[in-house]
Amino acid sequence: MEKQLDIFYNSTGLTGTELALSRMKAGSDSKLILSLFRCNPGQSFTPFEVCERLNFDYFRKINSVRRSMSDLTDMGFLVATSEMRTGVLGKPNHCWRLA
């Protein structure tokens, strides 16, 4: 049985339907990200590369992708590597790979 992937940080105090929908969305992002890594087991990706591969808008989704990748790392699905690549904004970004 797969660990819970629908982690949502309710920092804005959502309730009811809005909270349920936000949890579902957070879970679907994590599942898509994990699926990308599972389909490419020998590759590593930065958060920006994950956005690019999944056709996410960098500037709207990058923080959600980083949060999901961090959660997936905490759950043991991904590991952060020492490899770094220059990202979209010209800054170095860490790479992750499947655990």
Image (cartoon, rainbow, N blue to C red):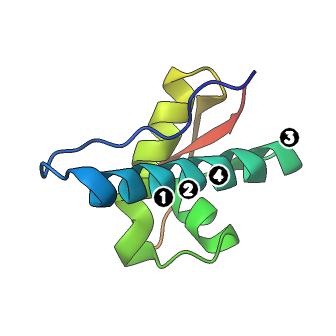
Q: Earlier in the sequence, mark 3 or mark 2?
A: 2
In the foreground, 73 or 7: 7
Between marks 4 and 3 in the image, the one whose residue lies nearer the viewer: 4
Q: Which residue is mark 2?
A: 29
Q: Is residue 57 visible?
A: yes
Between the C-alphas of marks 3 and 2, the distance is 18 Å
Tags 4 and 3 in contact by the CB under 8 Å rule?
no
The residue labelled by disc 4 is: 33
Label 2: how many Cα within 10 Å (few below 14, some 14–19, many 20+):
some
Distance Cα–Cα, label 2 vs label 4 = 6 Å
Q: Which residue is mark 1?
A: 25
Query: Which is more foreground, mark 1 or mark 4?
Result: 1
- Image-quadrant location for residue 72: top right
**Amino acid found under the numbered disc labelled 1:** Lys
Q: Is residue 77 above or below residue 16?
A: above
- Judged from the image, the secondary structure of the residue bearing numbered disc 4 is helix
Residue 25 picture location, percent across and down:
48, 58
In the depicted structure, whether residue 50 falls above or below residue 68: below
